[in-house]
Amino acid sequence: MMENFRKNIKDLLGVQLSDSQVQAFITYEEQLLEYNAQFNLTAIRDSEGIRLKHFIDSLSCLLALREKPVPPSRLVDIGTGAGFPGIPLKILFPAMQLTLVESVGKKARFCEHMARALKLENVLVLQSRAEELGQDPAHREKYDWAVARAVAQLPILAEYLLPLVRVGGGMIAQKGESGPAETQSAQNAIHILGGRLHKLIPVQISGVAEDRYLVVVDKVAATPKHLPRRVGIPSKSPL
């Protein structure tokens, strides 16, 4: 079955996974199935679903990341859950500094466990909220990329992600069929936060019927100091 996984990655992304990378994904899958039975980390509970809807879907971010001339040096994943898309991208880019942000304790602890199990270096797991991180000088505008998957509507998500991105970097929001409509509704928020829509990339994963999109935003100006607002405000009153 992992040969199909390897082929799907090659077909979608043009990337040939090494044996050690494939083994990392096998370990990740085994651990996710084991922990999920106890702690309910994700609604996807079968191997094929994990490979298609977690691993390959996460790696599809490469369609946006590779538009920059160099691999990402620092990436932050907001609302990472059980480590998606951050940990699969770290397996692909082992030299990258990765920060995983998750407010739910059991999910944050699983991410810490996986970083140890896969012997991943330069991985920081924070049980925190994006609004707090965006006002923390240690993280504000320090990342090449900020990514998130299925966290919030795009006007809200932009306020979570863009304050963390340096000028010249970018944000990637992984979206389903609502991607194009959300992109239109978020244009004002993106502009206020110092961003500019770069492109909307359709993603077609073999075996997954749902429409998928990557909303890619360039950070072109510094985010105003008062943004992001306090925890909970962006979701209650989007920009």
Image: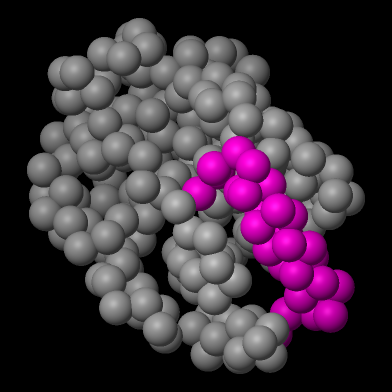
In what quadrant of the picture does the N terminus appear?
Answer: bottom right
Display coloring = one colour
**Residue 77: x and y, percent?**
54, 41
Q: What's the magenta bit mostly, secondary-structure-wise?
A: helix
Q: Tell me which residue sits at (27%, 60%) in the image.
A: 176
Judge from the rendering whether residue 33 lies leftward or rightward of residue 229; answer left or right: right
Label count reads 0
Residue 46 or residue 182, whichever sits in front: 46
- Residue 211 found in image quarter: bottom left
Judge from the rendering whether residue 109 lies leftward or rightward of residue 171; answer left or right: right
180 vs 12: above or below: above
* Residue 132 in view in this figure: yes
Q: Tell me which residue sits at (70%, 53%) in the image.
A: 34
Region rendered in magenta: 16-42
Task: Determine if the magenta segment contains residue 220.
Answer: no
Q: Tell me which residue sits at (30%, 38%) in the image.
A: 152
Task: Determine if the magenta segment contains residue 24.
Answer: yes
**Residue 236: x and y, percent?**
19, 18
Residue 229 or residue 82, whichever sits in front: 82
Outermost residue on the front side: it is 38
Residue 136 or residue 125, whichever sits in front: 125
